Amino acid sequence: MAELIGKDFTPPDIFGKVTGRARYAEDFRRDGMLFCRLLLSPMPHARVRSIDASAALAMPGVVEILLPDDVPEQPGPANNILTYEPHFVGEPILAIAAVDETTAHNAIQAIKLDLEPLDFCVDPLRSLRPGGPNARTDGNTIVPREGIREIKWSQADFDEAGTHLPMGQPGEEWAYGDIDAGFAESALVLEESFVTASTSHHSMEPRSAFAYWENGKCYLHASSQSQALTLPGAAEYIGVEPENLVFIAEYCGGGFGSKGSAYPVMSIPAHMSRKVGGRPVMMRISRAEEYFLGSARPGFQGRLKMGFRTDGRLLAVDLYIVQENGPNQGFGDLGSAASAVSIVYTPVNMRYRGIAILTNTPPRGAQRGPGQNQMHTAMEPLIDKAARELGLDQVAIRRINAPTHESGYGGSQGPISSAYLREALDMGAEQFGWAERRARSGQREGSKVRGVGVGQAFHSAGSNGFDGLVRITPDGRLHIHTGVGNLGTYSYASTSRVAAEVLGYDWANCEIHRGDSSRGLPWNNGQFGSNTSFTMTRTNYAAGMDALQKLKEIAALELGGSSRDYDVANEVVFQRANPSRRITYAQAATAAIELGGRYSGREVPDDINAMTRRSVEQLAGSGLVGVARDNLERRGTVPALAAGFVEIELDVETGRYEILDYLGVADCGVVLHPQSLATQIRGGGVMGFGMAGAERHVYDPRWGLPGSVGLHQAKPPSYLDVPSEMGWAAVDQADPENPVGVKGIGEPLMGCAGAALLCAISDALGGFYFNRTPVVADMIINAIAGRSQSHRPLQVNTQ
Amino acid sequence: MMKDMMAGFELFQPADVETALDLLDRYGDRGWRLAGGYDSLDWLKNRGKGPTAVIDLEGIDELRGIRETSDGIEIGALTTLTEVETNGLIQERFSLLADAARHVASPQIRNAGTLGGNLCQDTRCWYYRYGVKCYRAGGNTCYAAAPEAMNREHAVFGASRCVAVTPSDCAPAVVALDAQMVVRNRRGQRVINAADFFMEPSVDIRRMTVLEPEDLLVAIRLPNAWANASFYFEKVADRNVWDFPLVNVAAAFRMDGSTVADARIVCGAVQCIPRRARSAERLVRGQTRSDQVATSAGAAAVQGAEPLAFNQFKVPLMQNLVKRAVQGA
């Protein structure tokens, strides 16, 4: 066997990245191409009364205008392509195409736009108050399965709550067990309200797109995490049959969830191109525009009541989350947050209630650990608070509540595939030297004080039911076709190696086909949700096994006997009883072409997706085709779990701290690609530190204007804000529901680091809990100086 | 709101100061001085300023370099921050300025950003930068001073309609060093004390320095009076790289044995101009430096502070930084 699993290798796209040869959507050029620019709403909510584009269209070099009427209307609460009723500052109203960008923007500036300002809201609790403003004219919340509704809480709800989160009518809820009984049995009951900030994605590559039409086909280059899954959605936005859309997304300069599937803006150049007879149109999205109209993580205003036994066991949890949803459909962070609580802390009894409130801020979408990471950064410091009150060690209280393989997930308490969080805590505590570091926590040297923290996080990390597709060509090479996309984690490559592993291939004889739908790609899940490692190892396993079976059948046809008599090694199929009876993979591929039928892709399985079917038709006859749907068994949720350990030194006079050391430990099943895992643990750590300590949306509540629309304002961490060396480890225990034992891991690696840092800050401050993410220098200074915080207790979008 | 798409303008690239001064004179307030570009390009890309002519100073060699003079050091305004940070002469005599330069932005920005540009940069008030029509932009209100405004990074001293602050790390250092700013225009040259170079909003709300449109800052002189004094610089920001100060402090102490003979303590990001903590300076003069003196100096420095809704933290922060300056310098 090639033994590729668990080995480092050089992913093929890395050469393009380090040499600058990689071409992103913005890098493509074609003769006669136009540039388009967007007219963005300057108001948080408005209705367009009139548009006078006469001066703009009369400018030399201006070619065309694209209005909301020219694009498919997206019924609310879906995200718009263009709109006459913008719901956030920066929502695109129209586009202008011109021979160059400057001309296009000059034309945008020449447009006379008459807007009627409408009510707007940038704080969910304000909208929930009696008579509070609604972000949309038809309501202020989205109720699952019902759509947009208006829900207002009573004045009594607010009066009773005091400085806590009021808990009026929810939009969704679930429960298991008996929380009243759980609290009654508890030795310690903590009830806390908290805020987590909305944050932008900061993708290095803004969501630029380039499109043209040729012979009835639309060619779209766009910034996308995913490949196959994005195509149907993009086709729908454009209004073209999926088979007539060529979607090219070979490289993605970061998405972090915001480019996981099709998004409306990517269709604008295609619409414009269609309007100008197919002429190529480039739409470059600027950094500020990316902050305006790119996606964002929803913030929470929450209330958490926890009941503990004296040994720290969590007997009951009552959780309420108000999610700042942006103006549109948003994302289900709030429910995911609650489910994360159920699996990481395994409360014996739990109730969750939540409501997503619409605000006139950027549309919300998934961001790394959507819901889970907000929840863990809010809850982990409060677990520490409980440990402090119960006199328990921070690791010990987590161990006692850690999930087992038999733990349940979410409100339904459904099964999970495997859980090794306790082992991750133990491994981390030992490797980090937790006991020694904890002993010196609180030690003061001058103005500097030490603090330690441990954090945990979860994400559901696996899917199934997608297709695998491989080919062996007469030159003997293995071609692995993958439609998962290239988020930047290299997992498209590491998961492709499973097909090579199954077939015993030398990796040097393998080639990955991806990044362009015309290359014959199968129907695959998107590259998001930490699912790629689990999902794509299964599809590539399925395709590899199909190819393996066909190799053996061809050998039997050529050499006699049954396929069961044959085995493979060194890219040769041989008869076990007489290894001299053998054919090479290259010979088998030639034979497959001659045999035709299912061997060469002329016939395909009935259960594969239409996209895969089209791809196989395109490739048929070029070799031995292995194609199969992943029909392997999957019993339950696949938990990606992680623990992070942080030690800091905090300066009590400046509110600044230095992260002295970090260790991240992953429960990701079998380690698929060590180098990539290390990068994920470190990169996730950096994102987590940013979430915990700096990043947030800022809005002026009076005018609804965004105050963080640049990298220097939104403040993702810089390289000098994190340790130059960060440790990593993995439990490396196989997940039983994956053929090579692999689970995903990307998302909790952020949450555990952020949570650990917040715990360490509170530890350094002797147990001061901010109940807010991020914790920034001014909050620490105010806390130490004994001053009240500048923000109101549940205020959001503040500096 | 931000446009992120530069408008057209005429670009001039003079090779000598005289030509640059002619151009500045010709275009007046329609002209724009371009040095390292890190402030300028933001404005131009966002179409927040719309000059018809940009005068790129990059090709004027006489604006660069660090020279020893009979009474100190003269630094060309176009000298990069990296050169200021690493220059042996500055490190040896005026390490305060080298230290301040080292805290600006990021290494990449310091490689192109200039000392003159850092001193002349516009305020970072996010409302003003966003493009609202505030006092500073020629309007008739201050968005940042409103009761619900997000003004964490704004002034705690000297507000006058506008509550914006100086974002410069080098400005407090040059004020502490009693630097002199050499300014030229077509009519001649004038030398302005650093303390008088920065503009309070109560005097002119539309600009950050005394420079008129036809003026060019050509050099910064550091007189030997403060050479080899005892220095202290510290900056507190949200990030260690590429961030503006929440508060910074630059201090110089001339010692007479163990006694402070004279002191300069200057804070940035607390007022529109670098703020000299004169009461703290008076307090430490003639004293032996001790924790008690330092604590008193810190307390004195923040007397009269008037925080806004979101920046009360600047009071204890400034107090602590002044205390540390006295302790640690």
Image (tube, rainbow, N blue to C red):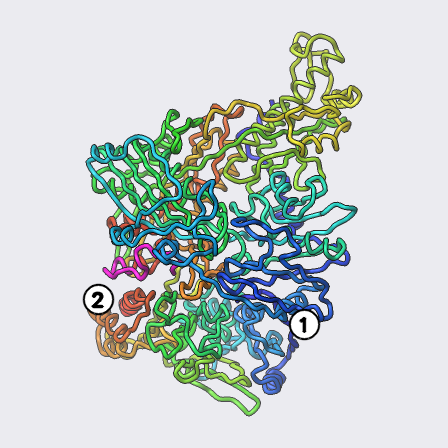
Q: Nearer the viewer, residue B220 or B303?
A: B303
Query: How many numbered markers are drawn?
Result: 2
Residue at 52 percent of width and 38 percent of height: A675
Would residue A399 be found to the left or right of residue A471 on screen?
left
The amino acid type of the residue labelled 2 equals Asp
Question: Is residue B275 something that shows in the picture?
Answer: yes
Residue B291's disc number: 2
Q: Which residues are magenta?
A: A782-799
Residue A396 highlighted magenta (yes or no): no
Q: Residues within 10 Å of mark 2 (few under 14, many from 20)?
A: some
- Above-or-below relation of B211 to A338: below
CA gap, disc 2 and disc 1 = 68 Å
The label number, if any, that marks residue B287 in the structure image: none
Identity of the residue drawn at 73% across and 20% down: A584
**A375 over A797 or under it: above or below:** above
A499 and A538: which is toward the camera: A538
Q: Where is residue A650 drawn, in percent x and y?
A: 31, 54
Residue denoted by label 1: A55
Which residue, as the protein is rendered here, is positioned at the far bottom? B187
Instruction: Indicate the position of residue A131 as horizontal and vertical percent values.
Output: 36, 58
Using the rendered view, name the quadrant where residue A181 is placed. top left
Establish if B189 lies above or below A192: below
Q: Residue visible at 71% across and 29% down? A: A477
